[in-house]
Amino acid sequence: SRSVSVRFSRLGMAANSFSPAQRMTTAVPGVTETVSKFLSYVNQTGSPYHSVSALLPGLQASGFKALSEKDDWASAVKPGGKYYVIRGSSMIFAFSIPEKVTTDTGMVFVAGHTDSPCLRIRPNNDQASEGYKQVGVECYGGGLWHTWLDRGLGFAGKVVVEGAGGALEEKLIRVDKPICLIPNLAIHLATADERAAFKISKEDNLQPVIATEAKVQLLGGDASVPGRKISGVLAGILSKELGVDADKIVDLDLCLMDATPSRTWGVHDEFIESGRLDNLCSTWCAFEAIADAGASPSICCAIGFDHEEVGSQSWVGADSNAVETWVARITQALSMDKARSLQNSILVSADMAHGVHPNYAGKHQRQHRPMMHEGVVIKENANQRYMSNAATMAITREVAKKQTPAVPIQDFVVKNDSPCGSTIGPMLCSNLGVRTVDVGVAQWAMHSVRESMGTDDLQHYLQLFKAFFTHFAEVDSTYKGAL
């Protein structure tokens, strides 16, 4: 548009340089391609189910084959093989096996999660107020909920429908059209105390508007089913998108999402703005790394868990028996000694890190202020909220040096008077009995509907995971403990 052309001309940039790929300025090799691939991925997501489904084309193109938990793995899992297994449609575990396996071959786990804080549509979601049709939602995780106001919202998730012969069938759905919105309260209608507190009621003030009752009556779109509590307007959308009759919709699990596509921003397109950077950035990099990893002496594993944002205690969470079970099945199929293998292994717990904020720099400990573009962040906490320790941090630094070019590393520690978040690291480390390091890359506005990170760090992250898959065994073989 003319306004865009004028704006960039004033910055000394040609009008036809509006393409992010052309504008992006970086000294880090491969960033432009990596950012493009990541944005393509994240713009297909919106629910944990889509976080998983959007990973599959990359895995399958790299030769990974699907396994089922119901099948016998003993005859399927072989040296040199590449496999993935999905649980509940929202958790995924991919692993590749070297051609030569010994009884104590180690494993390299890189683990992230597929979920993010969001507003999820309630089972009984048909609401109306003051002549407006609304969709009832509940808060999932600890979101910065005020950031969800005044944004066009789409949705993504899965719907259970009644198929042929009455059989139940899951269908994924993603609608990126802004079909609903949560309007803010005008400043003139709020008291001074309400404005100062900047508080909203999660129950009363976060219910999105989807239509006016009058328009629905005049123009149609209500597919209400007697005896069902699903919004008639929502049921109409689901029926149309899925190609099923509204009365065949049995149940649903739908997440609202910002309908604006993820994109780069900044004069040199040096930042990414997106929903769900926490933690799809980590998860995508883990699976991209394993799909593109070269020969490795280790069994390489990439994992995406669900329900991290609400404690991980579920069938598809990191505190389930999933990884322990799968490791046991893999080592049994390969005639390995599981206990010895795990002592030659490492877990890279990958979750995003808090980058220093130019407007709130005082929130960071003075000597530990991660910067965007400056590399992967090792997260340490003396109270074991993160699992990094002197040994695993040193190994990580050495592994990072093995990559060409070397991956830059930063450190993060919270202030003594600040609370500290946690990750899947502590529970997996305890349950598996495996050495662990917690890492991430710097971002702003964690748990906002729209988060930001640096483009260079996406490439740093990806390269570190590749380095772990390729070089960990070499570094670990020369590491000497004190006792």
Image (tube, rainbow, N blue to C red):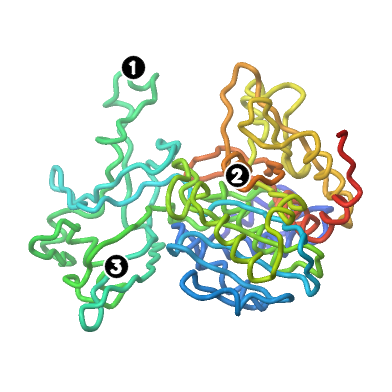
Q: Residue 160, labelled with which disc? A: 3
**Residue 365, can we see it?**
yes
Q: Is residue 266 left or right of residue 405?
A: left
- Residue, x 33% and y 30% (percent of image)? 200
Q: Nearer the viewer, residue 330 or 61?
A: 330
Give the CA separation, mark 3 to mark 2.
34 Å
Q: Nearer the viewer, mark 3 or mark 2?
A: 3
The local crowd at label 1, few if under 14, some if 14 to 19, many if 20 or more residues have their Cα within 10 Å, is few
Tags 1 and 3 touching, CB below 8 Å: no
Q: Quadrant of residue 245?
A: bottom left
Give the CA separation, mark 1 to mark 3.
46 Å
Q: Position of residue 396 (x, y in %)?
A: 80, 45
The local crowd at label 3, few if under 14, some if 14 to 19, many if 20 or more residues have their Cα within 10 Å, is some
The tag earlier along the polypeptide, 2 or 1, is 1
Q: Residue 192, labelled with which disc? A: 1
- Residue, x 72% and y 34% (percent of image)? 370
Q: Nearer the viewer, residue 286 or 109?
A: 109
- Residue, x 62% and y 60% (percent of image)? 327
Q: Nearer the viewer, mark 1 or mark 3?
A: 3
Q: Say which amino acid is labelled 2.
A: Ser
Residue placed under numbered mark 2 in the picture:
452
Q: Say which amino acid is labelled 1.
A: Ala
Q: Say which amino acid is labelled 3.
A: Val
Which image quarter is the C terminus in? top right
- Say which element carries label 3: strand
